[in-house]
Image (cartoon, helix red, strand yellow):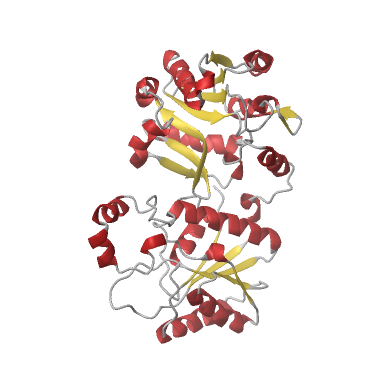
Amino acid sequence: MNIIAVILAGGYSSRMGSFKPLLELGGIPALSRICAAFSSLGLPLCVVTGHNAEALRPLLAEAGAAEAYNPDFAGGMFTSIRAGVLHARNTGADGLLLCPVDCSLVSPDSVRLVLDTAEAFPDRFSVACFGGKKGHPLYIPAKVFDEIIAHDGTNGLKGVTRRYNGELIRIETLDEGVLLDMDTSESYEHMKNYLAGRVPRLAELLPERRFLLARHGSTRPHREKTFIGRHDVPLSEKGREEARGAAELIKSLSPNCGRVYCSDLSRSIDSAEAIAAALGLKISPDPRLSELSLGEWDGCAISEIKRRFPAEYEERGRDILGYKTPGGENFYELQYRVAQCLTELLAADPSPDIVICAHKGVIQSILGLLGRKSPDFSAQTPAKGEVIVTRYTPI
């Protein structure tokens, strides 16, 4: 396949206050760094220029990159995207990998994951993610080049890509670099710290760990089926028995750990207390390990939601991972906060075994991260009171 990399470097950098393509990361201009990430995989390069284009041309020559000058750069990012897509179409590309120069810490490994997916599914969009959150690069298939070029710019690139949401392939990279940008001076400082190794990296913290993931026990029953996310429901007597059973199982596995992590909801805390008591440890509740927030639907009977919001309920059924209830979050956002929590937790705790007592969505999110997937509904679904023992397997 003829896939090219299109790097957007034509904006004013107004929010940053300095010209981003020339800002250095590790002693290398941002533009040179991102060009190197793509060219290391043999991809042809196209850099879209606009504001201050003359200052970039020596770097383009050094990188062997083609230039697509965007005379309409003052009109915003979409005009540069259109210029890059036009270049790709005119050169006969089968698809392109799109990346703003802001995101210059995207690694060659992450680019390779997207490239491999693009070659396997050349007519579908695919995107690098960290913890379920979309980042860069984004693969754009040639079948939509004309559609993007003809688009009037309403809602930017999303005005086109949202029509293909059902075809989008999310690729979990475990690389926070796919998300990091330099829109502000604070984010630029964070990128420098990340590059220098002063920011924990999840992919480096997962190996050599054993994860013991317990789902809380059964809760007191409702009169009818109810949406329960962060709605706090206490354990039933059956749930307390299940928690004690989970505790005995985990104890039998002789975990080498210093505490039991759990969410801040009572059904998780009470289950974790049983496990901690069996191990002679204390619990560490963290709200980032709480269940998916269902917002205004949380605690409501499903029959009521179906009656009051029939269209929204049907939409949720069509996109269970991506749908966000009013005032709530979707499963991708859940996985991202779990990834952030897990990164911080593992950086502070060197224990070879990590015991977490949480909820179905949280455990599925962790299993997804360990397997480099979206929240993993294809994996073993934990029953209430069940324990899953697993490890990270590098790809």
Q: Position of residue 252 (x, y in %)?
A: 57, 79
Q: Is residue 387 above or below residue 274?
A: above
Is residue 279 rendered to the left or right of residue 395?
right
Residue plotted at (54% across, 56% down)? 337
Q: Nearer the viewer, residue 112 or 86?
A: 86
Q: Position of residue 393 (x, y in %)?
A: 55, 54
Is residue 315 rendered to the left or right of residue 350?
left
Q: Is residue 75 visible?
A: yes
Is residue 167 rendered to the left or right of residue 205?
left
Is residue 352 rendered to the left or right of residue 386?
right
**Which quarter of the image is occupied by the N terminus?**
top left
Q: Position of residue 327 (x, y in %)?
A: 42, 56
Q: Position of residue 366 (x, y in %)?
A: 51, 59
Quarter of the figure with residue 157: top left
Quarter of the figure with residue 100: top right
Q: Is residue 252 visible?
A: no
Q: Is residue 33 above or below residue 193?
A: above
Label count reads 0
Q: Nearer the viewer, residue 348 or 287?
A: 287
Q: Is residue 285 above or below residue 24?
A: below
